[in-house]
Image (cartoon, grey):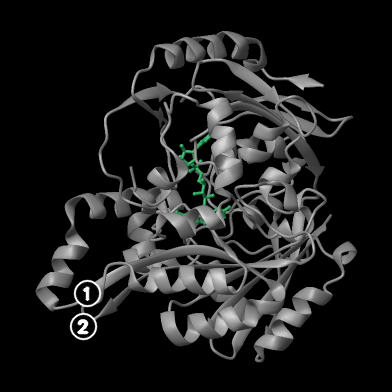
């Protein structure tokens, strides 16, 4: 076991936070340096809980192949730390500033999810700070197992994860990628179903337009005949159309989508090579783009430009999980009625635990496919606020899918609680936040409080 210098100071820092929580009145919010929430919030008065120093790797156990981290460590820092020992967390979300606690409370995913499920499914135990200031350790089978299973998709409304233990995956230095093109959506999703799990380490896909679908497999390897670099002038998503196979270092594979925020950097005009040189390699990443988008949202530059040019726009930023047998119907719907392209496709395999998380219930009988699509849809026609997002919510429910809650939601309250299991939620709320110090899930994720 290799403890880092921070393991020793964790109990004292935890104590400080516990005292802060006890004295907090009214609502509580996390004060941390980064966030990947993508909805504008209504300002409500809250106490800020300073968690910026809960961002360390605490121990790594090479024999047991586990790692213990603090909840607010970003995956960028975590990956840097674990790769030094030749390990990675089992599922590393694609954006560098996502934190491990955020990926559990707000649901993460990546191309290893076809094998390991979502990040919360591989957690072994967690320390959770509750509304009354106490910290409980929860595991799948101790007296707080209800909280262990209830925390995923709870968005900080039941408690905050301060520390957690997860398996560590031994990795090789390189990843070989193979991009396969499909024209028929049924064949595309069938190919996902037929993937032989033992043969590959990563699997995701990209829909560029109707009739142009790519499946990308990744395999760890010890050496590479050449190594591509998509951290500056070359753009990863374009390479999918251009190359049949490719090699990346394991670290560049993990962050392949971050440099251009998948493809969303196009909205900031940095996919042009002159602009890339002006902006500089260091600033080409999701953290820069998030700052620019928040600045834009605050000052309303796009809103102003739309107004003077006579456009109406709706932000459609969603990740939706659909059972694989209904995936081609959902794709047809997105192509015909929403029109945001490209679309990221990521299969989610079932694990023993898949069914057990009440606030993000997935069936263990079927594989799911995550559809990620992120853009602003412009029209000359004025529609009701959220009309495309509402359509997506309705189609998701019809096909037996589930939607992530990190961006805009328009559910009415009854539909919301049907999808995210009100009975289980309110039992947890009663047990772990009986005075309602935290907002509830509907207030936070739909009412934007
Ligand atoms: C444009 C966009 C693209 C995305 N793409 C991906 C993707 O490709 N892959 C992927 O995996 N995910 C993706 N996400 C979703 C992302 O993983 C979630 O939004 C996640 O919750 C963000 O984590 P964060 O650490 O930034 O949390 P924050 O944004 O800071 O917080 C999210 C919520 O979780 C709560 N929270 C944060 N930390 C904790 C904690 N330690 N304990 C309890 N509650 C906590 C907060 O209170 C808040 O309600 C995307 C999000 C956006 C906006």
Q: Which residue is mark 1?
A: 312
Q: Quadrant of the C terminus?
A: top left
Image spot of residue 388 (x, y percent): 38, 73
| Residue 362 falls in image quadrant | bottom right
| Residue 194 falls in image quadrant | bottom right
The answer to which of 174 and 293 lies nearer the viewer is 293
Mark before the other along the chain sequence, 2 or 1: 1
Q: Is residue 373 above or below residue 145?
A: below
Q: Is residue 189 visible?
A: yes
Q: Which mark is residue 268?
A: none
* Mark 1 C-beta to ligand 1 under 8 Å: no
Would you call the spot at circle 2 few (<14 residues within 10 Å), some (14-19), or many (20 or more)?
few
As helix, strand or loop, the secondary structure at mark 1 comes to strand
Image spot of residue 3 (x, y percent): 73, 18
Q: Quadrant of the N terminus?
A: top right
Residue for point 52% across, 44% down: 98
Q: Is residue 159 visible?
A: no
Residue for point 44% across, 24% down: 435
Q: Are marks 2 and 1 in contact (CB under 8 Å)?
A: yes
The answer to which of 261 and 163 lies nearer the viewer is 163
Taking the image as shown, residue 274 lies to the left or right of residue 416, namely left
The furthest residue to the left: 308
As helix, strand or loop, the secondary structure at mark 2 comes to loop
The answer to which of 15 and 425 lies nearer the viewer is 425
Taking the image as shown, residue 188 lies to the left or right of residue 305, namely right
Alpha carbon separation for disc pair 2 and 1: 6 Å
Q: Which mark is residue 380?
A: 2
């Amino acid at each position: 076991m290799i403890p880092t210098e921070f393991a020793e100071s964790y109990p004292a820092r935890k104590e400080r936070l516990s005292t802060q929580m006890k004295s907090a009145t009214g609502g509580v919010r996390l004060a941390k340096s980064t966030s990947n929430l993508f909805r504008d919030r209504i300002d409500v008065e809250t106490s800020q809980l300073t968690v910026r120093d809960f961002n360390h790797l605490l121990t790594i156990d090479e024999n047991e192949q586990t790692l213990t981290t603090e909840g607010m460590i970003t995956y960028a820092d975590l990956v840097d730390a674990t790769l030094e020992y030749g390990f990675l967390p089992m599922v590393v979300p694609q954006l560098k500033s996502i934190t491990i606690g955020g990926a559990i409370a707000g649901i993460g995913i990546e191309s290893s999810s076809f094998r390991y499920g979502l990040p919360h499914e591989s957690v072994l135990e967690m320390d959770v700070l509750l509304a009354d200031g106490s910290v409980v350790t929860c595991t799948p089978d101790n007296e707080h197992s209800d909280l262990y299973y209830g925390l995923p998709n709870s968005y900080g409304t039941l408690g905050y994860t301060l520390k957690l233990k997860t398996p560590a995956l031994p990795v090789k230095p390189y990843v070989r990628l193979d991009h396969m093109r499909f024209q028929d959506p049924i064949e595309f999703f069938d190919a996902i179903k037929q993937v032989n799990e033992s043969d590959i380490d990563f699997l995701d896909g990209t829909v560029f337009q109707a009739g142009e679908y790519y499946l990308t497999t990744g395999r760890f390897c010890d050496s590479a005949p050449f190594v591509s670099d998509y951290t500056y002038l070359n753009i990863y998503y374009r390479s999918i159309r251009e190359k049949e196979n490719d090699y990346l270092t394991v670290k560049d594979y993990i962050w392949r989508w971050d440099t251009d925020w998948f493809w969303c950097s196009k909205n900031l005009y940095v996919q042009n090579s002159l602009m890339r040189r002006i902006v500089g390699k260091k600033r080409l990443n999701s953290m820069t783009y998030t700052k620019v988008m928040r600045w834009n949202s605050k000052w309303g530059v796009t809103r102003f430009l739309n107004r003077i040019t006579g456009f109406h726009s709706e932000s459609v930023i969603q990740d939706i999980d659909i059972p694989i047998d209904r995936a081609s119907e959902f794709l047809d719907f997105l192509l015909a009625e929403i029109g945001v392209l490209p679309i990221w496709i990521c299969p989610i395999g079932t694990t023993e635990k898949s069914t057990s998380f009440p606030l993000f219930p997935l069936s263990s009988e079927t594989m799911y496919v995550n559809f990620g699509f992120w853009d602003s849809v412009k029209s000359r026609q004025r529609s009701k606020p959220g009309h495309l997002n509402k359509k997506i919510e309705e189609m998701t429910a019809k096909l037996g899918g589930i939607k992530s809650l990190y961006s805009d939601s328009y559910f009415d309250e009854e539909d919301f609680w049907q999808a995210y299991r009100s009975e289980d939620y309110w039992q947890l709320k009663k047990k772990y936040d009986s005075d309602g110090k935290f907002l509830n899930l509907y207030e936070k994720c739909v009412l934007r409080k």
